[in-house]
Amino acid sequence: MVSGGPYGLEDIVGKAGYGRGLLMLAILPLIWSFPTSLMVGELASAIPAEGGFYVWVRRALGRFWGFQEAWLSLAASVFDMAIYPVIFVDYLSRIAPTWTAGYRGTLWALAVIAGCALWNLKGAKSVGQGSIAMFCVLLSPFVILVAVALWKWHGHGIGALHQSIATPDIATAISVCLWNYMGWDNASTVAQEVEDPQRNYPRAMFTSAILVALTYMLPVIAVGLAGLAAGQFDSGANGGTGTWADAGRTIVGPAIVFAIVLGGMISGAGMFNPLMMSYTRVPYAMAEDHMLPSMFTRRNRWNAPWVSILFCAVIWALAVKLSFERLISIDLVLYGSSLLLEFVALVVLRRREPSLPRPFRVPGGIPGVIAVGVFPALLIFYAMGTARDERVLGLPALLFAALVGVAGALVYAITEFFRRRTGPTPVPVEG
C-alpha cells in the first residue's frame, strides 16, 4: 500500500539530480514515514477496527470530524487511485506505443480498474497474497540492474552522482518523494481482517519503512555510479515515468527492457489492488455508523464489501485522464489534510483515554505524541504551498481542496438531517 518498488521515482532524479534526490530519499523516511508509522502503530494496535483511520478520528473528535476524515480520504483516493493505471499505461507504451495511443490508453487504464475490482471481490486474503507475489516479481529486474550496474562501476569514481540538473525543480521532486513515501495509514482500514493486529501492525510499520527506503535508494545509487545521466530521468511527454526501461537498456542491454516494463505495469496494478481493498472499507464503516446507505455494508461470500468496491471503482475511473503531476499535487493536499486529523486524534485519545490498552505506545508521553506530528505537519503545509500554482478542473488546487472540505461539511449536514428524521444512531462497537 505504500510502495510499488522504484517505479515512480524517476521524476525525483530528473527534477533534482542524484545528490539532492538521494538526500530526499534518505531524510523523508525519518521525518515523514517514521513519525506516521509511530502514529499508526499506536492507534492501529489500540483500536484495530474495520475502517481504521476513520474510526480513530470519529472516536477522538466526534461524528463530524470522523465524517470529514473519511470524506477527505475518499476525495484524495479519487486522485491517488488514478495515478496507478496511468503508470501501467505509461510503461506499456514503452514496448507497445500503438496499443496505448489515443483512446486505447484510456481503455487499458479502465481495464486495470476493472481487473482489480474483480480481484478485490475475492476478499482481503486473496489481495494480500497476490500483493506479496507481485512485489517480488516487480523487484526482480532491479536485482539484475543493480548487480550489473555495480559490476560495471567496480569502484571507478562516483559516476554521474556528482552531476547537477541545469534547471532543477525541487518543489516537484519533494512532492513526488512525499507521494512515494505516503500511505502508511491505509493498512489500518482492514484491521478486523488482519491476524493479531495489536502485534502485527507496529512490526509491519517499522520493517516496511526500512524495506521501502532500501528498494528506493539502492537502484538510484547503482545507476548513478554506473554513469547514467540524471537528465535521462526527465524526458518525454510523460516526464520521467518509464525511464527505468531506458536505464536498463543502457546498463544491461535490451534483454532486460521487457522485464522492467512488465514490472512497471505490475507496479501500477499492484499498488492499485491493495489500496482498493483499503479505501473500500471506509464507506463500509461509515454505512455501519448510518452515515451512508446501508447497502454499503453488504458483503459477499468472501467477506468483501462488494457494493463499496464497485462504487469506488466507478468513481476512480472518472479521473484517469488527469496528468501525473497534477494528480500528485491535489492528492497530497487532500491526503495531508486527513493525515493531520489522524495526528490530532492521536493526541486527543492519549489525553482523553489514558487507560486505553495500547500494545504499542509512542514514547515520551503527551509531549512525545505532539512532537511526532510536527515534521509531517510542516511537510503537509509545504506541499499545500507548492500546490498553489496547480489547477484542477479549471480551479487553483488549494481552492479546489477548500471546496472539497466545504462540500464534506454540507454532505454531513444533509446526512445528519435524514438520520435524525429516521431515528437515533446506535452506539458503534469499537474494536
Image: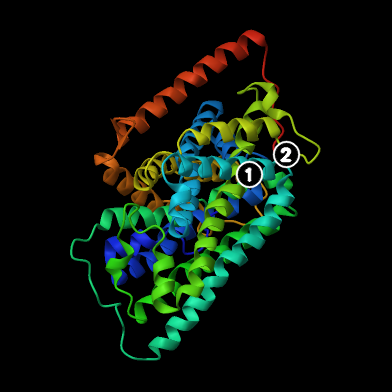
Q: Nearer the viewer, residue 350 or 55?
A: 55
- Return the disc, 2 or 1, that comes first in the chain's sequence: 1
* Residue 290, position as x, y percentages in the image: 65, 22
Q: Nearer the viewer, residue 76 or 108?
A: 108
The quadrant of the picture occupied by the C terminus is: top right
Is residue 40 in view from this perspective? no
Q: Nearer the viewer, residue 72 or 277?
A: 277
Q: Residue furthest top?
A: 421
Judged left or right of residue 337, residue 279 is right
* Residue 205, position as x, y percentages in the image: 58, 59
Q: Which residue is mark 2?
A: 304
The disc labelled 2 sits on which kind of residue? Ala
Q: How is the image coloured?
A: rainbow
Image mark for residue 115:
1
Judged left or right of residue 388, residue 273 is right
Mark in the foreground, 2 or 1: 1
SS of the residue at dot 1? helix
The disc labelled 1 sits on which kind of residue? Gly
Q: Residue at x 34, y 50 (%)?
A: 378
Q: Nearer the viewer, residue 131 or 29?
A: 131
